[in-house]
Amino acid sequence: MPPTCAAAAPPRSARPAPAARRRAALPAARRAVLLNTQDPQSLDMMAQVLIRLNDLCNAGRFARRALQVDPSYAPAHLHLGLIYRLQGQEQLAQQAFELARSLDKGGPTAEQAERLLQ
């Protein structure tokens, strides 16, 4: 069961893009999802945009939907792990990062997951 949704403060190390650029990405992500509601990449892209907007509740919803469509889509596991970490759910975050790493052995998602596991 996913944790309750609450906005989290962005990590200090994160340097968010200018607010206008972050907001501008939202309509494009929405269009991509509307064009194909069964595309895990589009759903995950929406999750990424919502993470940047600090809307972790909806970001988690889209990441989980991407994983319903394709349970082996490693980037969605990675982003779900990031959402969990930002929500203070470290154990769930670690599990998601480990799964992303195992699904993308040797790939870029596995490398990111490895860094987040350290």
Image (cartoon, rainbow, N blue to C red):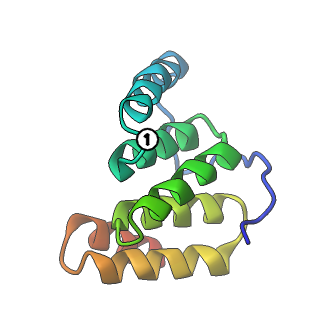
Viewer can see residue 69: yes
Residue 75: quadrant of the picture: bottom left
Quick one: 9 or 50, which is closer to the camera? 50
Q: Using the image as rendered, state which of residue 109 and residue 40 is in the foreground.
A: 40
Residue 45 location, x and y as percent?
Answer: 41, 42
Disc tally is: 1
Give me the residue at 43% from left, 49% from top: 44
Q: Amino acid at mark 1?
A: Thr
Which corner quadrant holds the N terminus? bottom right
Q: Can you identify the residue that label 1 sits on?
A: 37
At a point 65% along the width and 58% down the height, the residue shown is 86
The location of residue 113, given as percent across then percent down, is: 38, 72
Give the percent coordinates (x, y) of residue 6.
Answer: 80, 49
Q: Is residue 83 left or right of residue 66?
A: right
Q: Is residue 11 visible?
A: no
Camera-nearest residue between 14 and 8:
8
Residue depicted at 55% across the width and 48% down the height: 62
- Is residue 108 depicted above or below 29 in this figure? below
With 96 as the anchor, is 38 left or right in this view? left
Image quadrant where one finds the C terminus: bottom left
Residue visible at 72% across and 66% down in the picture: 2
Residue 4 placement: quadrant: bottom right
**Which element type, helix, strand or loop, lies under badge 1?**
loop
